[in-house]
Amino acid sequence: MVLEGIYAPIPTPFDAASGDILPGAMEENVTRWAVTTLDGLVVCGSNGELPFVSMDERASLVRAAKNAVARAKSGMNIIAGTFMNATRDAIECCKVCEGAGADAALMLPPHYFKASGMVGARKFFEDVANASPIPVVLYNMPANTGVNIDAATIKQLSAHPNIIGVKDTSGDMTQMGYIANDHHENFSVFCGSGNYFLPALSLGASGGTLAVANLYPESARFLLQAYVRGENEEARKLQYRLMSASDLLTRQYGVPGIKAAMDRAGLYGGPCRAPMGDLPDDAKRKLFESLDATGLEEYEKWRLG
């Protein structure tokens, strides 16, 4: 598997009354996304409320997503968030999700105890990758974990035959540049946010896992195509518009905002799982007005189907 193109890190659908996961709603959403040009989906990443979803629930969600992809005869890959705090549990989660149909595993660094630093992080990733039946994608998300996987460690890990790339959501363009410019073969650097998708591409990223792609996958595709064709001004204009939507859906309103926007767009967003709260009505109005102002709907004809 080669990590490239545009992936959407999709939210987890929960029942409003019971709080249980809804595999059926997952299948319906994935069926809708399957008609887009998305290259893949991330199930149970940060937008999927990873810390609140059990190993068995993750497997059920992966299975539902994979079933929908198969029925739609889509080529989308499924990456599963398989981080668990203990190494043996992370390995087991990789195996369970592989059995449910995941094509790769997205793995955060250990972050509760930090004394071992990058030495401990490297051993954790190597131990998991050695035992995982599916390829591992490193996930650098220091805003949530408090741990930044540095460029030197990522370069070392890029030599592992079962580690195929990194999703870098640090926002540190200097670090991303060093990583993209100096890694082993068969390793990809993925941008982790639509806020800086074009800068990441210009530094050598092969694509991105973008929260904004849940709602605006074709806008992201147009940007990528414009960059590949060398249409720099078009790519820059699209980046500004995509940045505005992405910033609203990540830094400003987060997962509750993505779910509210999905509900409005005819997808199932639904409630967040406690302790995360839902978006208040006044915030929804501000979010929707700001999203509409980007004008990105012109690219998203798939939502009309």
Image (tube, rainbow, N blue to C red):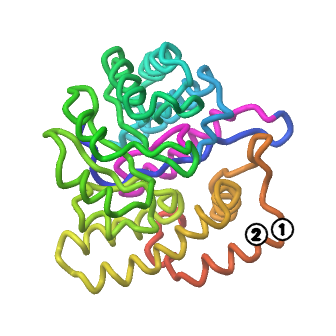
111 on left or right of 35: right
Q: Evaluate if marks 1 and 2 touch, with contact meaning CB atoms under 8 Å apart.
A: yes
> In the rendered image of this protein, does residue 155 appear above or below residue 267?
above
Residue placed at 49% from the left, 21% from the top? 90
Please provide percent x and percent y for residue 246.
52, 67
Residue 247 against residue 57 in the figure, above or below:
below
Task: Using residue 297 as the reference point, say whether residue 162 is left or right of it.
Answer: left
Q: Which segment did they paint magenta?
A: 19-45
**Residue 251, quarter of the rendered image:** bottom right
From this view, report whether residue 123 is shown above or below residue 8: above
On the image, numbered disc 2 is attached to which residue?
Answer: 284
| Element carrying mark 1 | helix
Quote the CA–CA distance across marks 1 and 2: 5 Å
Mark 1: few, some, or many residues within 10 Å (few <14, many ≥20)? few
Residue 22 colored in magenta in the image:
yes
Looking at the picture, how far across and down is residue 97, in whole percent? 47, 23
- The answer to whether residue 95 is above or below residue 140 is above
Q: Which residue is mark 1?
A: 281
Amino acid carrying label 2: it is Lys
User: Is residue 72 highlighted in magenta?
Assistant: no
